[in-house]
Amino acid sequence: MAHGSTRPTSRDVAQAAGVSQAAVSLVLGDKWRGRVSAPTAQRVREAAHELGYRPNLAARNLRLGRTRTVLLVVPALTTEFFAEVYTGAARVAAQHGFGVVLYPSPEGVGPARDPFASAQAALDGIIASSMAADALTAIRGDHLPLVMLDSDPEGSHGATTVNLDIADGIRQVTDHLLTLGHRRFLHLAADIPSWTFDVRARALAARLTTTPGTDLRTVSAPISIDAARTATEAALTAPGPRPTALVCDDDKLAAGAYKAARRAGLRIPDDLSVTGLDDLGLATAIDPELTTVRLDAEAFGERGMRALLAVLEGQAPEKGDLPVNLVVRGSTAPPR
């Protein structure tokens, strides 16, 4: 086993797994089928994972020729956010002689087919949104140098993570609404099992628990305008005091909430303040313009690509979350 700062070698993996170095090479090169038994292959992968072994990239490049190609795995491109992430990643990649292949998960956030005969042979590394993490399994992306975007640093299987400071964005939204005098809150949450949306819910609840006399209700909807309208209509007509502030997990949900408010005969912001998150083009297309949290998607993509380049060179990526900022527009006002 490797000790201290010495990087584990294929020999260390072979010793730990009780196999030859040739077997390690076959398994980690995904060429083992028919030559190594499945239990042995699993033992090699587990040993490599436990030792934190990464194949020697310099040797691999000499052997295979580095493709200088990176895959960016994102959910289906339903907003401009991930297009801007791609723009930022591709800009940094081009400066270093790399190309970026964009791979939107066909089912949005579900599993996807391998777009390559062998991702490992065709790619040097992968940048993936946690919202499309299932696609990684299909393309065996967990066997390549990997950077996860919007992902739990504690639960990303050792991958490097790059995050926006979403929790701080929610705190900025909540503080803005509390300062205006709001105490009855409705959270329109994205109905997607993803760490980044869990962060939003936890940050909102945590901030409101520090202010006495607040009330928080939550409804969930898939990220679509129609689904958001339906969920908000039900929440606004439910028994009990009506909320005066609606915190939406993203701008698209907020647009659906606008339609629900109009159908309920409520005026924004006179009867209901609404906030979003993302600052998409949509935020200034609706009326009144939306108070939301601006996420710099291009900077996010740039940071993701720089982190992957650092991993490829065996260096430590930048630390710290990217800052976000509240943009106050016409959709928020003091409650009547």
Image: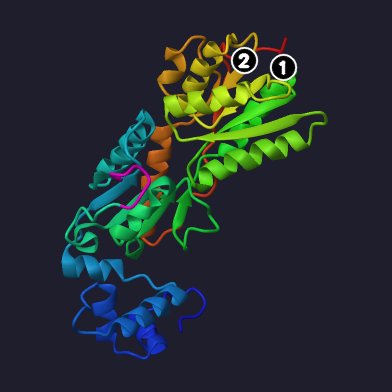
Q: Is residue 68 above or below residue 21?
A: above
Specify the principal SS of the magenta part: loop
Instruction: Tell me the kind of residue under disc 2.
Output: Thr
Q: How is the image coloured?
A: rainbow
Task: Name the image quarter holding the C terminus.
Answer: top right
Residue 108 lies in magenta, yes or no?
yes
Tell me where the magenta segment starts and ends, as one range.
104-111
Residue type highlighted by circle 1: Leu
Magenta stretch: residue 105 in it? yes
Q: CA distance from mark 1 to mark 2?
A: 8 Å
Image coordinates for residue 198, horizontal then vertical, percent: 57, 44
| Residue under label 2 | 332
Q: Earlier in the sequence, mark 1 or mark 2?
A: 1
- Between residue 80 and residue 55, name the one nearer to us: 80
**Which of 157/13 is in front?**
157
Q: Secondary structure at mark 1?
A: helix
**Measuring 52% from the left and 48% from the top, which residue is drawn there?**
195
Comparing 277 with 121, the one in front is: 277
Where in the figure is residue 238, as x and y percent of width and height?
A: 65, 25
Q: Is residue 269 visible?
A: yes
Proximity of marks 1 and 2: CB atoms separated by less than 8 Å: yes
| Secondary structure beneath label 2 | loop
Q: Is residue 103 left or right of residue 266?
A: left
